[in-house]
Image: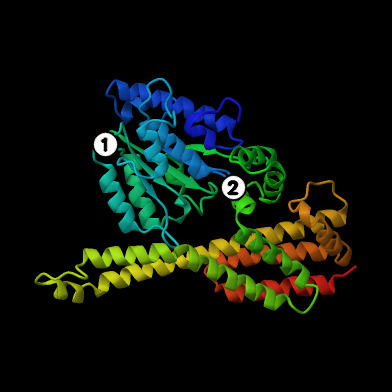
Amino acid sequence: MVGVSGVFERLVGQEPVVDVLRAAAAAARDVAASSGTVADLSGSAMTHAWLFTGPPGSGRSIAARALAAALQCEDPAEPGCGRCRACTTVLAGTHADVRAIAPDGLSIAVKRMREVVADASRRPSVGKWQVVLIEDADRLTEQAGNALLKMVEEPPDQTIVLLCAPTVDPEDISVTLKSRCRHVPLVTPSATSIAEVLQRDGIDAERAEWAAGVSGGHVGRAKRLATDPHAQAQRKQALSVARAAMSDGVYGTVEQLLRDAEAAAKELNAGLNERETEELRTALGAGGTGRGTAGAMRGSAGQLKDLEKRQKARGTRAVRDTLDRALIDLAALLRDALVQSTGAAVTLMHPDEAEQTRKLAAYATPEGLLTCVEAVLECREAIDLNVKPVVALDAMAAGVSTALRTQRR
């Protein structure tokens, strides 16, 4: 992180990306200073559409938001200073000319994208550019992607589009949309880089190194593991599936995993759901005393039902995201056992669970452990394809248990 300052210091282990974004922000500053438009960015280090990709935790959204802040920055000498009002409001998500879009549920619908496109086509109100930042752009529906593509192909004079997605797989991002964007791939940051950031945030060195070592290169996850006992407990629960698969308790363990994920999602969204519902009811006239308020509420059932539907979809996504993190942890543990069983000199992804992985390596053949890893990955894919989590988890439990018991050493 040496030499990185301002909004870009939030990017961990991505120095080449920081260099690209700084050059882009400087080019955009020069164009804005001469009252130029998107067309004047041609041939410079800046362009009107970007696609940030990288594995979970690499900092895709952080990179996009840092660039958005640098584009709006009020410091003429150092775009992205991190101190001015524009930088702080962009990072806080309150800047009037930066629209951050993320899926509430399983996807980003065309209706929402059309609204965003319409708003982004206007001139900036307080900043230098209109910026549209779309997180999880791989969850755009086909129609939403087409609505966005039209704006990217025919960009308004002062509109910049920033997309974030896990990969550039055509199944995730349309080839046409991808071809209109400048692609910035991020890499998994090293455990050393993550530990340095955690220590800078006041976490003691030993805990920071532990969290960085078991986070799988995910900066946000490392912070949660270092500071949140619930995150630590969820990880332990996920890793216990492998131990339970060698006995008769695996089904109970995966069912507890699902219950924990549902409870965590409910707790995460409870406050937001309540606030959204109360705000909508107030906007529709609930609690009012004037003429017509009762009639307004009687006609609002459809809007309240739509809100409940969106909240349910968001809860479903939260459960799936929580389960996915648990399954990644479990697959990594089984992978550790597999590499130990083959004698490969590879860094363990769960070094604090070395004793458990040694027992697994001694218990099952490499073929059996590989089958276990495949069962976990198939479970992740099934849940992503809308298979009910309880069904997918039970199938995984059966696959892992059978592999361990039938392919023993």
Mark 2 belongs to which amino acid?
Answer: Pro
> Residue beneath label 1, please?
124
- Determine whether the residue tagged by mark 1 lies in a helix, strand or loop: loop
Vertically, is 259 above or below 37?
Answer: below
Mark-to-mark CA distance, 2 and 1: 33 Å
Mark 1 belongs to which amino acid?
Answer: Pro
Look at 48% across and 68% down and name the residue there.
266
Which quarter of the rendered picture does the C terminus lie within?
A: bottom right
Residue 44 visible in rendering: no
Where residue 145 appears, as percent x and y from the top left, is 39, 52
The answer to which image quadrant residue 14 occupies is top right
Where residue 180 appears, as percent x and y from the top left, is 42, 39
- Determine whether the residue tagged by mark 2 lies in a helix, strand or loop: loop
| 212, 175: nearer the viewer | 212
Look at 71% across and 44% down and name the residue there.
209
The answer to which image quadrant residue 176 occupies is top left
Label drawn at residue 55:
2
- Number of numbered callouts drawn: 2
Local crowd size for mark 2, using a 10 Å CA cut-off: few (<14), some (14–19), many (≥20): some
| 26, 259: nearer the viewer | 259
